Amino acid sequence: MRGSDAVSGALFSYVDLEKRVRPGHPLRVIRAITNEALASLSVAFDALYAPEGRDSIPPERLLRAFLLQAFYSIRSERQLVERIEFDLLFRWFVGLGVDDPVWDATTFTKNRDRLLAGEVAAKFLAAVLAHPKVKRLLSSEHFSVDGTLIEAWASPKNFRPRDGSGPPPGAGRNGEQDFRGQKRRNDTHASTTDPDARLYRKGRGKEAKLSFMGHALMENRNGLIVGALATRASGHAERLAALHLIDPYADRPNTITLGGDKGFDAQDFVAELREINVTPHVAQNISGRRSAIDGRTTRHPGYAISLRIRKRIEEAFGWAKTVAGLRKARHRGLPKIDWQFTFAMAAYNLVRLPKLFGAAA
């Protein structure tokens, strides 16, 4: 017998949101780790809000919503709010009931500065890594480091001389500019849209773009990100960030190794690593100069293993750019870029946990 296509909406729903999410859904594992990590940050959240006044949107719900934005490649916060409105899976993950109202998109804007001031992204990454089930997956001896360019939300047309000289832009909201024959450098020019962005090219023959640099430290056992930060783009930023990221793990009695690509093969960088008792497992750069890595390092089997495993950090960068929306920054200013990049690295770890837990079982 053919069923009827008539629509008759029910007045009440007696199915709990918890039962609408299948038992094996990956978000169940992610949500459990996220909730425990956020619970450990309760004291830090209390310090960000006034003790009196009207109740605000709980920061835990805002951060769960940010995670969904990264997981499902949602381009804007207005689209995120719309998705939470009608998607029961999103409501369940964020912590809203079926009948609970969704906050306005401007709530993210108003609370972003508060979350920035509290360094919540870095604390959340640390809380996820400190979870007992996650901590046992981490290596405390072998690490890899790398950096990636994040294109700034700024037009090259607005990269103008710092002293205010130069021809005025053409007529219209997006007037034409002719930069042919002009030498534009970061020490003489700055972006009027995002002063923290720097003109940088990825390599010879590549186009120079206004960019930031994201840096990550990965442990080599399971490829989880254990440290992240964003900086202004420069030729020395990667090596300086690497020293900053490995510093909490340095000066230990056990052997600490740090893998990296050819860009880290510099005499001063290798010497600084050895001073803090870190063995540099960086790829040799023998193009036209002498490598800082010699037979003392390359003779060990662990060196070849580090060079092979270090490439896994590029998976995190690829996920952050293609899925989490970091191919081009959505915000302006280094503090916001740093927050967004660090939070994306924490989201990447959470995405990988269901598979890692299954392999460890």
Image (cartoon, rainbow, N blue to C red):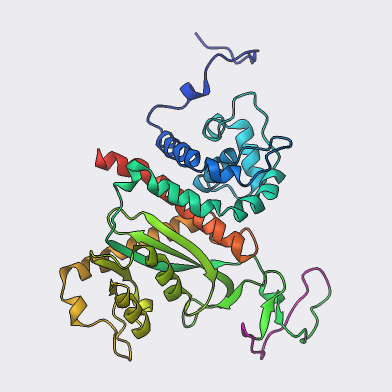
Is 156 on the left or on the right of 253, as rendered? right
Residue at figure coordinates x 54%, y 74% from the top left: 233
Name the quadrant of the C terminus.
top left
**Residue in the foreground of this view, choosing between 343 and 210:** 343
- Quadrant of residue 227 in the image? bottom left
Can residue 271 be spotted in the picture?
yes
Which residue appears farthest toward the top when viewing the image? 1
Which residue appears farthest toward the right when viewing the image? 171
Q: How many marks?
A: 0
Residue at figure coordinates x 45%, y 74% from the top left: 240
**Residue in the foreground of this view, choosing between 189 and 39:** 39
Q: Is 54 above or below relative to 256?
A: above
Residue at figure coordinates x 62%, y 42% from the top left: 80
Can residue 329 be spotted in the picture?
no
Q: Decide whether residue 186 is among the magenta residues.
A: yes
What x and y, as percent, mark residue 101?
68, 29
What x and y, as percent, mark residue 237?
48, 75
Which residue appears farthest toward the front when viewing the image? 51
What x and y, as percent, mark residue 199?
59, 77
Q: What secondary structure characterizes most of the magenta part?
A: loop
Residue at figure coordinates x 29%, y 84% from the top left: 292
Q: Is 342 above or below relative to 59?
A: below
Q: Is 273 above or below relative to 90?
A: below
What x and y, as percent, mark residue 143?
31, 63
Magenta range: 172-187
Q: Decide whether residue 357 is among the magenta residues.
A: no
- Quadrant of residue 62 in the image? top right
